């Protein structure tokens, strides 16, 4: 096990045979905004894969000034739209933010990426 050096909003989550995982907290303070970063090795193709896991939300809010009932049905209509889009196409486009605003938080995020890179390079077997 490596001695991870992070303190501010970046933590070593786990170390496995071919991967290392970190959590990165968002500066907004909400645990729902937290991201998990998995840095893993694919020995077969000799590559390092960087995976970000984050809870994403699909905005279905519609504001209709006149009627709360119309607003409710507009929100439900958007939810069905996205559900059918996923069902029939298998795709949906979403985005999310991860706020990293303090210098030490940014430095710790960069250090985690570098530590993960070094961890993977130490375990990646380059055989010619």
Image (cartoon, grey):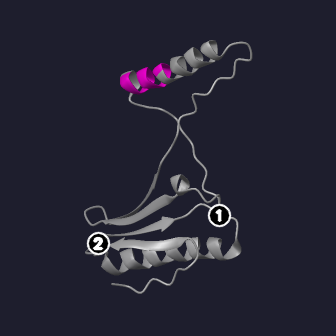
Q: In which quarter of the image is residue 91?
A: top left
For mark 2, give the secondary structure: loop
For mark 1, give the secondary structure: loop
Location of residue 26 with respect to 80 vertically, above or below: below
**Image location (x, y in percent) of residue 93:** 52, 35
Location of residue 6 with respect to 29 vertically, above or below: below
Spatial CA span between label 1 and label 2: 27 Å
Q: From the image, tell me which residue sits under label 2.
A: 16
- Answer whether residue 25 is magenta in the image: no
Residue sitting at x 25%, y 63%? 44
Location of residue 4 with respect to 55 vertically, above or below: below
Residue sitting at x 70%, y 70%? 102
Image disc number at residue 100: 1
Report the front residue among 105 and 113. 105
Residue sitting at x 29%, y 72%? 16
**Image location (x, y in percent) of residue 87:** 37, 24
| Residue depth check, mark 1 versus mark 2: number of the one nearer the observer | 1
Q: In which quarter of the image is residue 12?
A: bottom left
Q: Which secondary structure class fits the magenta region best?
A: helix
Q: Is residue 83 left or right of residue 66?
A: left
- Answer whether residue 84 is magenta in the image: yes
Residue sitting at x 61%, y 28%? 61
Q: Which of marks 1 and 2 is nearer the N terminus?
A: 2
Q: Residue furthest front?
A: 68
The stretch in magenta equals 80-87
Image quadrant holding the N terminus, namely bottom left
Characterize the local packing of mark 1: few (<14), some (14-19) or many (20 or more) Cα atoms within 10 angstroms.
Answer: some
Characterize the local packing of mark 2: few (<14), some (14-19) or many (20 or more) Cα atoms within 10 angstroms.
Answer: few
Q: Which residue lies furthest to the bottom in this view?
A: 3
Image disc number at residue 75: none
């Amino acid at each position: 096990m490596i001695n991870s050096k992070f303190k501010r909003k970046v933590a070593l989550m786990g170390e496995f045979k071919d991967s290392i995982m970190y959590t990165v907290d968002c500066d907004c303070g909400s645990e729902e905004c937290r991201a998990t970063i998995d840095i893993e090795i694919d020995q077969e193709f000799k590559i390092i894969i960087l995976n970000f896991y984050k809870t994403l939300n699909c905005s279905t809010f519609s504001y209709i000034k006149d009627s709360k009932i119309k607003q409710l049905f507009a929100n439900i209509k958007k939810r069905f739209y996205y559900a059918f889009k996923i069902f029939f196409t298998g795709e949906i486009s979403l985005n999310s933010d991860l706020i990293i605003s303090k210098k030490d938080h940014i430095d710790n995020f960069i250090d985690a990426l570098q530590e993960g890179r070094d961890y993977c390079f130490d375990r990646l077997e380059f055989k010619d």
